[in-house]
Amino acid sequence: MKFEPDSAGGTAVRTRLGSNVHKTLPFQSPWRVMMVGKNPGDLLEKNYLILNLNDPCEIADVSWITPGKALREVTLTTAGAKACIDYTSAHNMQYVEFDAGWYGPENSEESDATTVTIDPARSKGPLDLPEVIRYANSKDIKILLYVNRRALEKQLDELLPLYREWGIAGIKFGFVQVGTQDATRWLHESIIKTADYRMVVDVHDEYRPTGFSRTYPNFLTMEGIRGDEPELEFFDNVPTVWDETKVLHARIGEYGVIARRKGDEWFIGGINGEQARTLDIRMSFLDPDTRYTASVYSDDPSVDTRTHVRIDRLKISRDFVFTTNLGSNNGIALHIVSD
């Protein structure tokens, strides 16, 4: 279900379901929640409510579920895969994900995801997947496989035990259907089945977050955004799970600045919309008795690197105010560590 503005205006909203709902008695309906906050940032800081309305974790042993950072492998070759594994191992990453084409043309109903059959339109190969998995294990890197929904809907029950035998850590569900009761039920049931084989899931496309990941935390993430534009040094350091989140600036559809803490380190990300603006970032969330060094990553066309990212180091404390000038569709990132 989605909310949408009422056509009559005012503060009313309407709900819109992706399909009719059919149930047999007795049944339990899902939660319907509308959060109200003082500002957009207040809503984001309290979005744990969505998780908390879901049932507790159903997986007895979660030690095999590893959050982390992934690199997409697109050459679909043994040599390219080993290079990706070396790269992820050297840069504090945890996964290599094989993209579409490793089992044939992803849009073809004839492609068989139980086989390694390279799509010739994407790669000439060769890809020795067992050797790649062996090499990844030697480097403590996990392998994810992209599988389009066409194959998942036909072959999931066959794929899961096979991939478990291969040593695959998880599946990226591609082009899943979303919105309808049947599509959501199929996806949730598939995630449960995947958990039975101790594999994680990354869902691609417009799945609507429901907090289901509290009950089945092998459902690691939903993918639908661009990435790879900050400098590599920032990616080396940034974690993927957090202890605390604070929203420093937020206006829906215009800009946002968010600070997140992992242990004693803070990371700040800022993103801006169409209109250039100046924002003051206050460090009042820092410990008052500690001095810090902030690494600032910002766009600078004059920097002679591929990314054109400028890196500045600043000595700061809790009373420091960082003023940033954000251009149109621009952003900034900070990594703050205690001295």
Image (tube, rainbow, N blue to C red):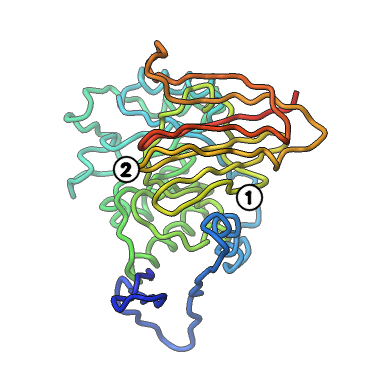
- Disc 1 element: loop
**In the figure, is residue 181 to the left or right of 52?**
left
Q: What residue do we see at 44% from left, 21% from top?
A: 309
* Residue named by callout 2: 114
Rendering quarter of residue 277 = top left
Give the residue displayed 28% in from the left and 22% down from the top.
126
- Where's residue 85, x and y in %? 46, 23
Q: Name the residue under label 1.
A: 62
Q: Quadrant of residue 23?
A: bottom left
- Would you place residue 27 above or below residue 159 in this image? below
In the image, 339 versus 82, the foreground residue is 339
Q: Which amino acid does label 1 sit on?
A: Val
Q: Nearer the viewer, residue 294 or 132?
A: 294
Seen in the picture, residue 312 relative to 335 is either above or below; the reply is: above
Quadrant where the C terminus is found in the figure: top right
- Where residue 326 appears, x then y in whole percent? 44, 34
